[in-house]
Amino acid sequence: MKFNLDNRFTNELPADPILENTRRQVTNSCFSFVSPKQTKAPKLLHCALELGKELGLSEKDMKSDTFLNYSTGNEIIPNTKPYAMCYGGHQFGNWAGQLGDGRAINLAEIEHDNLHWTLQLKGAGETPYSRTADGLAVLRSSIREYLCSEAMHYLGIPTTRALSLSLTGDQVLRDMLYDGNAAHEPGAIVCRLAPSFLRFGSFELPASREDITTLKQLVNYTIKHHYQHLGKPSKQIYLQFFQEVADKTLDMIIHWQRVGFVHGVMNTDNLSILGLTIDYGPYGWLEGYDYDWTPNTTDRQQKRYRYSNQPNIGLWNLLKLANALYPLINETAPLEKILENYKHQFESKHQEMFAQKLGLESHQKNDKELYDQLESVLHLTETDMTLFFRQLANTSKNDSPSMALDRIRHSFYVPDAIKDAIKLKWLEWMTSYLKRLQLESISDSDRKANMDKVNPKYVLRNYMSQLAIDAAEKGDYTLIDELYTVLKKPYDEQPAFEKWFQKRPEWARHKVGCSMLSCSS
Ligand code: AMP
Ligand code: MG
């Protein structure tokens, strides 16, 4: 197994001169060299074979001892020097100072078929940025990260990728609900891939320290390698760079809203400068369509990162990035204009996305009303988002309103609740929708085909991950593979997997891991 190495991050950016692995403030540097912890008995649980091919790895390579050793940190790829990145961040609205890769270690950068990848291990031990924690990850959170990053990719949503999931053979102590009941759990490592793991917080940290030299080096580096089409850095190019980051961030969030993904911890250290979904922690998927839902119990009171607030938080985080870039631009008006524009862009892109979900090709004057009305009827009783949109595609223009309502009946958690005033409201909406469909020239079957391309049939519901976790903790890894397989084709019918196209079962409603998640990974 031989990689075509191109370690440009460590070659071109300033390194922390201290080599000891002690926890400290790291200044005037973008990263610290650090070695992964040796693991006791590593074991590969699953690997993404298609992704491996993109790196030039065969199935044989990925199932070899060498790969197992690289992907769990027991062996260093020859001619490489692993490192942890230095960054800061705003956490839950407050500046948290230096954070950094506390439990992630970058192995190397690889070039293959004109694609550039950074390989990173999550859970490979302490770094100078581990603060009070151990740098490790447990099996449950690693399964969640592994499955969800790949599921997002196959949904067509920009994301970091996951190449492999392994057990370390070590035990890790965790207080899962932060309630004083710590217990040992199996340790695991996910090998993640992305063109770059730089975050908004990577730029905020040098700016907060008024270290303009490092800030400028980092921004120039990012433009040179990840926004190369922009050309030679200048004030104008910095503004264009910010505009593109804003566009990518918005596109990513619109995708999240489309499929009902709630990130859960949209701190600025968890927002990628490339607009990739990154850091899968206490994320979740809307089941009942509920604006106010957040999977993260740590955010239960404030609900800062609830589903409906994700677009606003994107903007808030972009404002922090704008502040960080300001010393290179020295003018607020053009930055403000980009932020202001985000709001308008959001409105139009959100409407466009809603139109697609409803199978509408053209835009009509009163469509906004139709979307708003739908959002309010979806809130009348608990209605499963994924089931609803998927089943709505079966509507025929010639349906009566009650026939159309029957088609989506399966998406109500309590079908008997659809009576009296609630039923009337639903029939009212169906009447408007059917009337609206009459204005479309497209056939029922073509509309269904279009809708099925944007409304996934299969998403990684929390209870599905939890079933895979429960089985894996007992040594049975088959469900990880089954979910991985079904989520590779989320828009296809896949009749063999129909059992995953169902509402969240009642047992999962209040179960830890299904409805309650914390950051304790
Ligand atoms: P997160 O919000 O999970 O992305 O993490 C926020 C910060 O905490 C990052 O700097 C992480 O590296 C750090 N962190 C989280 N968990 C651990 C851990 N187990 N050990 C060391 N650092 C951690
Ligand atoms: Mg993070």
Image: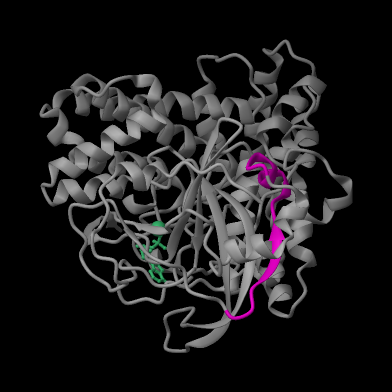
Residue 44 counted in the magenta span? yes
Left or right? Give the position of 323 relative to 20.
Answer: left
Q: In the rendered image, is residue 267 in sight? A: no
Query: Residue, x 11% and y 26% (percent of image)?
Result: 331
Q: Residue furthest front?
A: 79
Closer to the camera in the image, 271 or 507: 271
Nearest the camera: 307 or 401? 307
- Compared with 200, 23 (above or below) is below
- The answer to whether residue 285 is seen in the rendering is yes
Residue 418 on image: x %, y %: 69, 50
x and y percentages locating residue 334 in the rendered image: 19, 23
Q: Nearer the viewer, residue 302 or 405?
A: 302
Q: Is residue 67 above or below residue 14?
A: below
Residue 158 is situated, as x and y percent measured from the top left of the image, at 53, 38
From the viewer's perspective, tell me whether residue 271 is left or right of residue 412.
Answer: left
Magenta span of residues: 40-56
| Quarter where residue 228 is shown | top left
